Amino acid sequence: MFPIAQNLKDVRAAIAAAAHRARRDPGSVRLVAVSKTVDLSLIRAAVDAGQDLFGENYLQEARDKIAVLGRPVSWHLVGHLQSNKAREAVALFDLIHAVDRLKLARALDAAAARQGKVQDVLIQVNQAGEATKSGVDPAAAPALLQEVARLPHLRVLGLMTMPPWFPDPEAARPYFQALRALQDHLRGLTGLPLTELSMGMSGDFAVAVEEGSTLVRVGTAIFGSRG
């Protein structure tokens, strides 16, 4: 079996096992294959192995890949986005994971209006307060969500977070638990379904699934190290 296909099989099996441990339906968790800096041949191998959802961090790279591969698969933007790139992001991506400020949300809403689209987004929360990472402070998330939810051409599906890296994935569990608790609080506050939680990467996705993740963003475990 081609390594990419085997890697995908292994990751899917780990997701299913984690879901079963948490008494969840494995089908409630979607695997986002993060393909930034990955060669097209490897992405094609993943598509051939049944992977239909990919995450990209950079607009220019994503544009080039989508131009070649087209849209037999779904594309998500999982990296930081500048407000002046909103038009292109709306044109390229089915879901934008990292909305963390009102200025960006308004730019996305305006772009979606011009393109006749309702853009699906997630609110990125910086649970650890790391200065090197994007995301709204948890305390400010309710106000941001309420403002974004008023924008007619955006649909907020849920929340995203990226905890600090730890050699032991168990150390990330409190951050995933905190995002799940915030999701519950925001549901009660706004009445929005907020069905999606984007959390978990190659080193900790099993823990994230145990804590309620519906979207795991996995790159290295599928495609190998980026060198």
Image (cartoon, grey):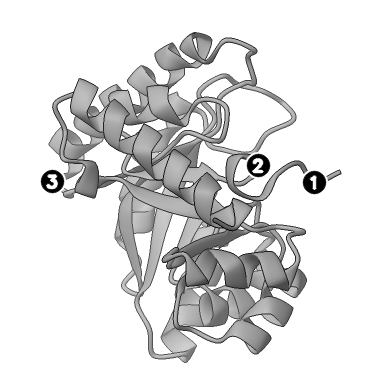
The residue at which mark 2 appears reads as 220
Viewer-proximal residue, 91 or 148?
91
Please state, as top left, top right, bottom left or bottom right, where the N terminus lies in the image.
bottom right
From the viewer's perspective, tell me whether residue 11 is left or right of residue 130.
Answer: left
- Specify whether residue 76 is in view: no
Mark 3–mark 1 Cα distance, whole angstroms, equals 41 Å
Question: Front-most of 55 and 72?
Answer: 72
**Which part of the image, by quadrant, shows the C terminus?**
top right
Q: Position of residue 25 (x, y in %)?
A: 16, 40
In this figure, what is the number of numbered marks?
3
From the viewer's perspective, is the residue at label 3 or at label 2 nearer? 2
Label 1 packing within 10 angstroms: few (<14), some (14-19), many (20+): few
Q: Is residue 42 left or right of residue 122?
A: right
Looking at this view, is 139 or 183 the one in front? 183
Q: Which residue is mark 3?
A: 191
Residue bearing the label numbered 1? 226
CB under 8 Å between discs 1 and 2 = yes
Q: Nearer the viewer, residue 222 or 81?
A: 222
Work out how far the residue at label 3 is from the one at label 2, CA to CA, in angstroms.
37 Å
